[in-house]
Image (spheres, rainbow, N blue to C red):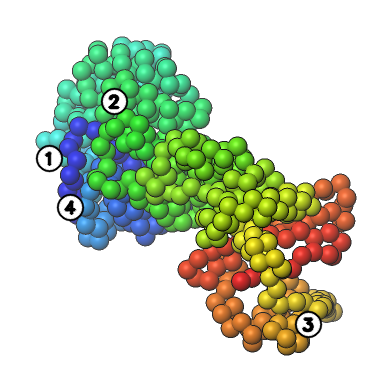
Amino acid sequence: MTASSELDDSFHVFDTTLRDGAQREGINLTVADKLAIARHLDDFGVGFIEGGWPGANPRDTEFFARAQEEIDFRHAQLVAFGSTRRAGTTAAEDPQVKALLESGAPVITLVAKSHDRHVELALRTTLDENLAMVRDTVSFLTEQGRRVFVDCEHFFDGYRANPEYAKSVVRTASQAGADVVILCDTNGGMLPAQIQAVVSTVLADTGARLGIHAQDDTGCAVANTLAAVDAGATHVQCTANGYGERVGNANLFPVVAALELKYGKKVLPEGHLREMTRISHAIAEVVNLTPSTHQPYVGLSAFAHKAGLHASAIKVDPDLYQHIDPELVGNTMRMLVSDMAGRASIELKGKELGIDLGGDRELVGRVVERVKERELRGYTYEAADASFELLLRTEVQGEPLRYFEVESWRAIVEDRPDGSHANEATVKLWAKGERIVATAEGNGPVNALDRALRVGLEKIYPQLAKLELVDYKVRILEGRHGTNSTTRVLISTSDGSGEWSTSSERRDGVGDQLTVR
């Protein structure tokens, strides 16, 4: 378990996804999951990865044991998390402190109480004893050759209640040998101006090297983190995609992007910022959460443009409506086609799809009107690029693209006395001048229809055998019409290497054919 970095020690990016991020409701990481995420974070180039609390549970203990054997860290140092010793004992005798050493982690983060009421009510000890616990534990671990960071839990609330005591905890930790003392907004209730003022004062009064750990309960965790940096903090604690307890933590990716692109700080190895979108999505897959499409920098919609006015400007210069070049963070610009689209949107989208409209204003005008007319009927193209491409190619070609025609179809659902069900579908269609009749069974009428259609079409288009349904969504439009409402269906399909989406609308059983190219 080694790590080397081309970066100096003047500024730290510290990730706590494996500990604090794992406290998010709905996330339950296995040891294998934690190892996979640790590799992704090391690939991204963060300086420190907090792996969990060894000794507190078997999973974290196993993670540290396996990480030493299975991961050759190239950029990050692995960090073990624990607390200061218990009251009334010594750090050398405390089993929890021993477990931190046994983890083998070169860096240890200690959580310490810095709010006087928490000391008295939660720890049930005196303020002086709490300072002794901080001093003894930090000194003991540094004497054992470990680098120590100290998280001052509930610091900002404690500072508001008793500023002198909160600062005394910072001062004690620093003097005992802690490399960094992190001010934690544990309840997430602070605002940027408050964070900046407090960090500035604590830095001036204690002389300690300070870090920031911000929860997102006011929606200000990223802003609070950057405000602390403005005030002199040189260590930021974040989680991938903002995962964390309650509403989450400061999001690693916008914080790092802001530091690199807005502040000009070199916090990642050269070239690694371009991996940010990939890393964000890869970690989302490991924790089994759908990546947020509207996440800053890395979201699918982060550089997506819908309004015609925006598209006109972007056609002249993309920087007119984008704060950075999306390629800097591994993302791409996308043009969305909708009833808000103008000529520029259509031309740019055509170029994105590899279709040169050749400056044909009449053709572009027809496409604009066609999109608006169909969206009025319930279609949507901004999420269905494949459907728009078919529409566009139809207009360019001057006639509909028809790879097959469905003559008729029927589905039979049979309920049996024993409670079992049978679903059978028959499809009659024409393809390449040949009439095909195909029948199939399925675990439901839709599945049976899908199988029947595939049985028929794969004789003519064998490449369809590779296509798989990735996702589909059904939305009821104009719900006031009840069962006669328009239904919009969005289907995502993949051939194993690419993915595309098509859209259709139906009312009273009548709808357009979804054509797959």
Residue hosting label 2: 233
Frontmost residue, 497 versus 412 = 497
Question: Mark 1 is on which residue type?
Answer: Gly
Question: Mark 2 is on which residue type?
Answer: Ala
Secondary element under disc 2, as helix, strand or loop, is loop
Secondary element under disc 3, as helix, strand or loop, is strand
Relative to 347, is 500 above or below? Answer: below
Residue hosting label 1: 145
Which picture quadrant has residue 286? bottom left
Is tag 2's residue or tag 3's residue first in the polypeptide sequence?
Answer: 2
Q: Are marks 2 and 1 in contact (CB under 8 Å)?
A: no
Quadrant assignment for the N terminus: bottom left
Is tag 1's residue or tag 3's residue first in the polypeptide sequence?
Answer: 1
Classify 10 Å Cα crowding around label 3: few (below 14), some (14-19), many (20 and above).
some
The residue depicted at 50 percent of the width and 36 percent of the height is 321
> What's the mark number on residue 428?
3
The residue depicted at 81 percent of the width and 55 percent of the height is 486
Is tag 4's residue or tag 2's residue first in the polypeptide sequence?
Answer: 4
Secondary element under disc 4, as helix, strand or loop, is loop
> What's the mark number on residue 169?
none
Question: Mark 4 is on which residue type?
Answer: Thr
242 left or right of 440 in image:
left
402 left or right of 484 in image:
left
- Please identify, in this view, whether the residue under mark 4 or under mark 1 is nearer the observer: 4
Question: Mark 3 is on which residue type?
Answer: Lys
Relative to 76, is 496 above or below? Answer: below
Query: Disc 2 to disc 1, how far (Cα)?
Result: 25 Å
- Please identify, in this view, whether the residue under mark 4 or under mark 2 is nearer the observer: 2
Q: Position of residue 435 (x, y in %)?
A: 76, 87
Residue hosting label 4: 2
